[in-house]
């Protein structure tokens, strides 16, 4: 095989990877390596294929070989940083970012990739600078503008974020995520709204583009709500959500089995003799139903000088999954629950702490505010006996409605219930039962905070929070809305405002449309 043949194979492999034709690209790379075993880009492209197949360990190994054979390629370091960040090796990812930046790449894709990594690590200020560099090279790339807008939103730069989302839409009107993100940033009025644009876009979304329809329906519903047209808003939400639920083939029975399995492993005493020697008291878990006030409490606590937020970390679930060694595709399922009795809880506590502690490790405590960690309360207490756990409680109808009208991470299976109002109500009932179960075991070690009480009597409830966390009073916690640090959750806009009751009792605006779930929740004694 001549040098020219290898060059052509290399070009072909690059093109095939870009087109997502990974099997053919894989074959080309192997042909190259059969003649040139140290060809750096062949290893790198194989790493990209592994990354797209979610084979993270393999991707890391292949990119490391590429780097060892070419120490001066910033693209290798950029994607190396990306994979490392995806497996929670945050400090290593940051080292790779710095190495890439030191090589001053002119490539837009390198700057965008590095910015995405920095955004994932919470360094949105540096991310914004790099997104802008990428845009300077490719000003008509809508994805770059979308990524820039997201970081600007997380930083609280809402006007600049709106402009960036509008730029995305001007470049590509069917970039549907930009429509839903933009709607969350602004309050529509009769004089200024995007309702006509969204209605036109909705007629253009193909029936097979379920996620596109979902984004447009949520954007349209948000704007209709702002105009007080709650019936229309609910109808359009049901249109988008029902199509998504049908695609997922989801039933609430799937979650019923999961909740039952979690309780069962504690009820049969399988873990009674399992204890952890992990003594750290650094983690503060803030959890509860999504949209119940977890971000608000996170902001209050992280406004304290001794506390730093790590956002919505999935690390506890991921580290548990790794230790169970189950081969199932889901992070938590019945197979994984069954394997929990075989794990070492000291190892789990240490691995979680190592994976989660902030990259800039200056705070005494850190807040992990992944709401769905409520599934793991018993396991958190087993692995991290000195961790603090704060459970948010909110009026049930407001929680159900808020879950239904929030566009969570699309295709993240643990939010599948949110596409149907009845499923929301049943899921909430499961949550309440599980919380009663955890309280029966750990009542003195958990703190429950009412969202409504927090809003009504903020100083009293914040003092309860700080006392439980063994923190002294600081006025910053009462003035949490002035906290300049980034927020990357669905509440990123609301928590930059002073405490208010705007969302309390929202469900009452929808009239008889919510009668069915109200009746169900009443029958469960939750109203």
Image (cartoon, helix red, strand yellow):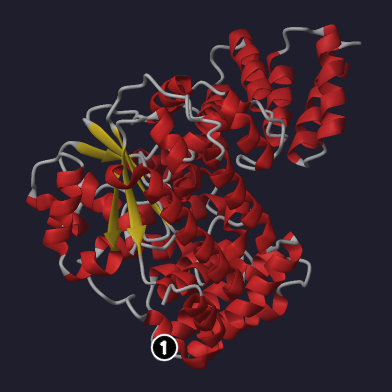
Coordinates of residue 158 in the picture (x, y in percent): 34, 62
Crowding around mark 1 (Cα neighbors within 10 Å: few <14, some 14 to 19, many 20+) is some
Coordinates of residue 17 in the picture (x, y in percent): 76, 35
Residue at the image point whose x is 29% and y is 65% from the top:
451
The answer to whether 127 appears left or right of 214 in the picture is left
Camera-nearest residue between 188 and 375: 375
Residue 275 image-quadrant placement: top left
Coordinates of residue 7 in the picture (x, y in percent): 81, 20
Camera-nearest residue between 265 and 312: 265
Counting labels gives 1
Residue at the image point whose x is 81% and y is 12% from the top:
33
What residue is shown with label 1? 509
Residue 527 image-quadrant placement: bottom left
Image: 353 above or below 311: above
Coordinates of residue 126 in the picture (x, y in percent): 35, 38
Residue 228 image-quadrant placement: bottom left
Camera-nearest residue between 475 and 251: 251
The answer to whether 125 appears left or right of 315 in the picture is left
Image: 362 above or below 210: above
Q: Identify the secondary structure beneath mark 1.
A: helix
Image: 407 above or below 140: below
The answer to whether 205 appears left or right of 7 in the picture is left
Q: Is residue 170 visible?
A: no
The answer to whether 487 appears left or right of 230 in the picture is left
Residue at the image point whose x is 57% and y is 68% from the top:
426
């Amino acid at each position: 095989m001549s040098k020219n043949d290898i060059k052509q194979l290399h070009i072909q492999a690059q093109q095939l990877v870009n087109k997502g034709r990974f099997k053919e690209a894989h074959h080309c790379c192997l042909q190259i390596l059969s003649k040139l075993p140290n060809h750096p880009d062949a290893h790198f492209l194989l790493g990209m294929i592994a990354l797209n197949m979610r084979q993270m360990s393999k991707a890391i190994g292949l990119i490391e070989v590429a780097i060892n054979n070419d120490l001066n390629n910033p693209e290798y370091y950029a994607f190396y940083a990306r994979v490392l960040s995806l497996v929670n090796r945050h400090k290593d990812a940051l080292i790779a970012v710095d190495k890439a930046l030191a090589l001053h790449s002119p490539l837009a894709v390198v700057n965008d990739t590095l910015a995405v990594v920095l955004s994932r690590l919470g360094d949105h200020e540096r991310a914004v600078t790099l997104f802008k560099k990428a845009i300077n090279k490719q000003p008509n790339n809508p994805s770059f503008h979308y990524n820039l807008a997201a970081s600007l939103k997380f930083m609280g730069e809402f006007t600049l974020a709106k402009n960036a989302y509008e730029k995305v839409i001007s470049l590509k009107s069917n970039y549907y995520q930009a429509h839903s993100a933009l709607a969350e940033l602004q309050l529509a009025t009769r004089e200024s709204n995007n309702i006509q644009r969204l209605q036109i876009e909705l007629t253009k979304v193909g029936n097979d583009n379920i996620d596109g329809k979902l984004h447009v329906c949520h954007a349209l519903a948000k704007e209709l709500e702002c105009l007080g047209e709650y019936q229309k808003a609910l109808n359009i939400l049901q249109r988008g959500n029902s199509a998504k639920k049908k695609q997922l083939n989801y039933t609430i029975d799937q979650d019923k089995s999961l909740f039952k399995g979690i309780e069962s492993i504690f009820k049969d005493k399988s873990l009674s003799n399992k204890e952890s020697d992990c003594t750290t008291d650094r983690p503060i878990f803030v959890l509860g139903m999504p949209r119940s006030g977890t971000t608000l409490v996170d902001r209050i606590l992280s406004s304290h000088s001794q506390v730093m937020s790590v956002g919505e970390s999935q690390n506890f679930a991921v580290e548990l999954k790794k230790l169970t060694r189950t081969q199932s595709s889901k992070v938590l399922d019945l197979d994984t629950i069954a394997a929990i009795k075989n794990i070492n809880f000291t190892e789990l506590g240490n691995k979680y702490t190592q994976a989660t502690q902030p990259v800039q490790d200056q705070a005494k405590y850190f807040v992990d505010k992944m709401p769905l960690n409520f599934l793991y309360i018993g396991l958190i207490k087993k692995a991290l006996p000195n961790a603090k756990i704060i459970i948010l409680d909110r009026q049930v109808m407001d929680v159900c409605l808020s879950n239904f009208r929030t566009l969570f991470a699309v295709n993240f299976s643990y939010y599948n219930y949110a596409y149907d109002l009845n499923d929301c109500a049943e899921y909430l009932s499961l949550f309440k039962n599980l919380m009663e179960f955890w309280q029966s075991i750990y009542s003195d070690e958990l703190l429950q905070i009412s969202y409504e009480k927090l809003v009504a009597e903020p100083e009293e409830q914040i003092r309860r929070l700080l006392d439980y966390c063994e923190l002294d009073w600081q006025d910053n916690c009462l003035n949490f809305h002035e906290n300049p640090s980034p927020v990357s959750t669905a509440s990123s806009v609301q928590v930059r405002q002073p405490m208010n009751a705007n969302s309390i009792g929202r469900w009452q605006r929808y009239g008889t449309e919510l009668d069915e779930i109200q009746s169900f929740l009443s029958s469960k004694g939750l109203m």
